[in-house]
Amino acid sequence: AAAAAAIESGQIHVSPEGGLALSDLDRLKKSPKFEVSTRGNEGNAVMNTIEYNFRRKELADRRVREAIVRAIDINFFCENFLYGFAKPASGPYPTTSPKFFAKDVPRYPFDKKKAEALLDEAGYKRDAKGQRFSLRLVPAPWGEDITLWSTFMQQSLQQVGIGVEIVRYDAAGFLSNVYKDWNFDLATGWHQYRGDPAVSTTVWYRSGSPKGAPWTNQWGWKSDNVDQLIDAAAFEIEPVKRRKLYADLAGQVNTEIPVWMAAERLLI
């Protein structure tokens, strides 16, 4: 609120990367006095995540992971919670990375009936109170959008019979509980894309990261095929072959859903 007042009064001239509330950005973008733009941040796309703990038997079932994705109306979230400053993601690489963005990958659009059917098929039918099971969601403590996203996830999953308890920690507590102690069922935060999949993306999927390493595959999930694709792409120097390897990787992880990149936006 102080930053919004300062920029409106002319005390400051620029407010970069999340300095203003989304509601203020939405209001100021309608004024001819201000430019509200993501220009210059194309190399730093942020993607809201759904991170699954495979040690929880329900989440080890791919059908349950797909059901969770299908139960959440990401279009609605982007338009109504993020004021249109985001759009649904469709894989591990954002649209701002045209050399690697993978168009032909499995997608799971919002479909509440399909989500219910997948949960039934997996053997988790509603009980007398309409509940299937409950999950513990640990959100990262940075970013207004993460707070909104975790609440929207909770509300959406309740609609298909999955109870969600949101447990909040400070930064150190979040990193420790999710990536070191594995004390979560679902987690959510940011994947920040750094211009090339080898820099910040493949660590979300490659097995073998040291326990406690933040923003890495600490899910209890392993795919030899995915590991091989990541390793091959890391050593490939021919551009066309390298893009093909990363496209194959996107198809694999969008099929298996070890972690879901849900919404894509650029920081303002």
Image: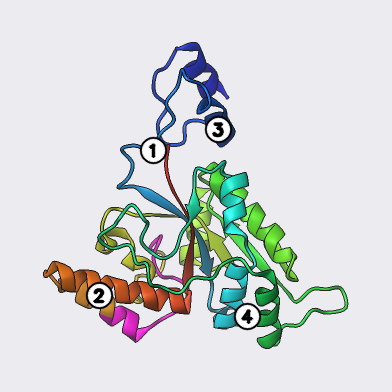
Q: CA distance from mark 3 to mark 1?
A: 13 Å
- Whichever of labels 1 and 4 marks the residue nearer the N terminus, that label is 1
The residue segment tinted magenta is 213-228
Q: Position of residue 241 (x, y in %)?
A: 17, 74
Q: Which mark is residue 245?
A: 2
Along the line of sight, the residue nearer the viewer: 99 or 92 = 99
Instruction: State the residue lying farthest toward the right.
Output: 128
Image quadrant containing the N terminus: top right
Kind of residue at disc 4:
Glu
Q: Does the residue at mark 2 contact the one at mark 1 (Cβ under 8 Å)?
A: no
In the rendered structure, find residue 85 and report the number of the disc placed on it: none
Picture layout, residue 178 above or below residue 245: above
Residue extending farthest left: 238
Disc with the residue nearer the chain's start (4 vs 2): 4
Residue 31 is inside the magenta segment? no
Nearer the observer, disc 4 or disc 2?
Answer: 2
Q: Which numbered tag is attached to residue 58?
A: 4
Residue 38 is marked as: 1
